[in-house]
Structures are given as structure tokens and as C-alpha cells.
Image: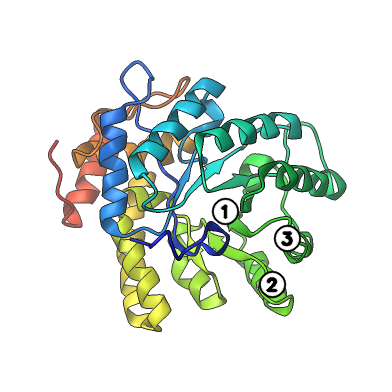
Amino acid sequence: MADVSTTAPATLRGVVPPLLTPLTPTGELDVPSFERLIAHHLDAGVDGLFVLGSSGEVAFFEDEMRDQVLREAVRIVAGRVPILAGVIDTQTRRVLAHVRRALEIGVDGFVATAPFYAITGPEEIEAHFRAINEAAGLPLFAYDIPVCVHLKLGADLLVRLGAEGIIDGVKDSSGDDVSFRRLVSLNKLAGSPLTLLTGHEMVVDGSYLAGADGAVPGLGNVDPAGYVRMDRAAQAGDWSTVQKEQDRLAALFEIVFQPVGKVGPAAGVGAFKTALWLMGILDTNTMSAPMTALEGENVDRIRTVLTALGVDVVR
């Protein structure tokens, strides 16, 4: 595991999985499963954890649930790796309210998207991140996820905000490899003020070759050790191992394509939760309402992928 005494969140790099949120059959936080899931990550040697991201179902939780998830994560991790808290919401005032509560809980940094629902442009986005920076006083990562926010964060704006110390890094889940490559180049020209993490788990190898500092892979919930091995191999310049690990993880990612009749997080996050349930780490594969858990043939298809790859399943 990363040594938090020498690895400040501002320079956090490596593997920072977006932590799933295990739920009981009635939709409450499943604390024992949460403890096992976090142990699964820490035992694999991850460098940090991103709590309350898209994979953590943040958009489905009321404020009290968000606070409980953060409190339990901080308690369980107990300072062993940095915790980045997702403070994702529609507009600035709501995001700042999440920041204030997360500061009281004791997180190590923040991840925020651009504002959404009401249409915003570059001026509003810049003001949004400046307001979060002023309120937070901790490292801030911009989360570029246009599939949910419906706009793309511009590389020029991100690098300028990084150079001014407004943001410390970017979690790029845009799926736009050309844009990411440009962001890497502009960041280097500016003296590398930003830590650049890819959320595109299928092409982490290519992102490392382009100059990424690490990854925030949703599939890392199922196999964090594989992403850690790939990261360490990339740092060592062992590109044959990087390719080998990415090829294996790409085969594992096939679990998200198995559900029939499901779309979005109900399929993707649902597949991750189902895999972890089959592996015995989670007690249920419950999803947040109005989503429903995978069952029947959808579970059987995921089990088939896991067993074909030699993953131990108990269900």
C-alpha cells in the first residue's frame, strides 16, 4: 500500500479505484460487505480510494447516505491510503454543502464534475471549480464525464486551472483518447501542474503510454491487484507485462456486456456488484432504487466469464 506519510493527495498517482457502495436488500449501507471490499482493495496495494463516484452510485443517494458512506470509509481505511470524496451535484451551492460535511468527516481530497442539469458554459464551469477550491482547502480533482454531465471539460481550461493551483488533477472518464492525449501534452508544456488519471479501464495501457499518472478503474473493484500490477509495470517500463495485464482485464471486463435488458449503471455497476457477490466479498448485489439487481441468466452469464478466467467464485 502507499505510504500516506510520504504520498500527499496533491501528488496522488497510481491506482485509485472508484469504490462501490454495497447495499443491504433494503437499500441501506452494508457495512460488513463494505469492510471486506475495502480490505480487498488495500490488500491489493491500491494507492488511494475514490469514494462516492459514479461506480459508488453517488447520484442515487440522499445527503445522509452520502455522509454515512464517507464516515465508514474513513473509519475503515484509518489513514492507510488517501480518500478522495466525490462531491458531485447539479450546482455549486449543493456541492459546497457536500464539501463542508466531508471536511468535518475527515477526507483527504475532493472530486467534482462540472455543474449539470442547468446548461452551463466555460465561465460558469471555471467559477464552479474556483468556488470549490476556496471552500475545500484540500486537493481537488476535476471529473470529466460528459456521458453524465453532457459537456466536455476543455483541456486548455483544465491546464490553466491547474497552473493557477485551483485544481490538482483530472479524472478523465470522457472516453476521448484524442482529447486525453492533448491534455497530457498541454499539461507537460505547462510544467505538469496536474495529476492525470484515466477512468477508461479498457485502455489503461494506452493511457500510460500517452503519459497518464494512474487510473481510476471501475473494474478495479473486482480485480484491483491486476491494475496495481499494470501500474507498477508501467512505472518500470515493462510494457509486455502492461499489455498482458490489460488483455486479461479486458477479458474480465466482458462481465459488463453480459446483462440482458439492462443499461447504464444497472448493467455496468450491476455486473461489478454481481461479480463481487459471486466471489463472496459482497453479501448482496443490490442496486439503488429504481435500479434492480441482476438475477437469473444474467448472473449465470457473469459467473461463466469469471470461471473461464480462473476467478474463484463461491456462489
What is the x, y in percent for residue 305?
24, 50
Q: Position of residue 77 (x, y in %)?
A: 36, 44
Q: Which residue is mark 1?
A: 173
Q: Is residue 232 left or right of residue 104?
A: left
Q: Return the disc, 2 or 1, that comes first in the chain's sequence.
A: 1
Q: Which residue is mark 2?
A: 187
Marks 1 and 3 sit apart, C-alpha to C-alpha, by 22 Å
Disc 2/disc 1 C-alpha distance (Å): 17 Å
Res. 284 image quadrant = top left
For discs 1 and 3, the disc positioned in front in the rendered view: 3
User: Quick check: can you spot residue 259?
Assistant: no
Q: Earlier along the polypeptide chain: callout 1 or callout 3?
A: 3
Q: Is residue 93 left or right of residue 237?
A: right
Residue at x 35% of width, y 76% of height = 233
Q: Tag 1, which secondary structure? A: loop
Q: Looking at numbered disc 3 in the image, what kind of residue is underneath it?
A: Gly
Seen from the viewer's position, the closer of residues 80 and 28 is 80
Q: Nearer the viewer, mark 3 or mark 2?
A: 3
| Quadrant, the C terminus | top left
Q: Say what amino acid the circle numbered 1 marks.
A: Ser
Q: Quadrant of residue 34?
A: top left
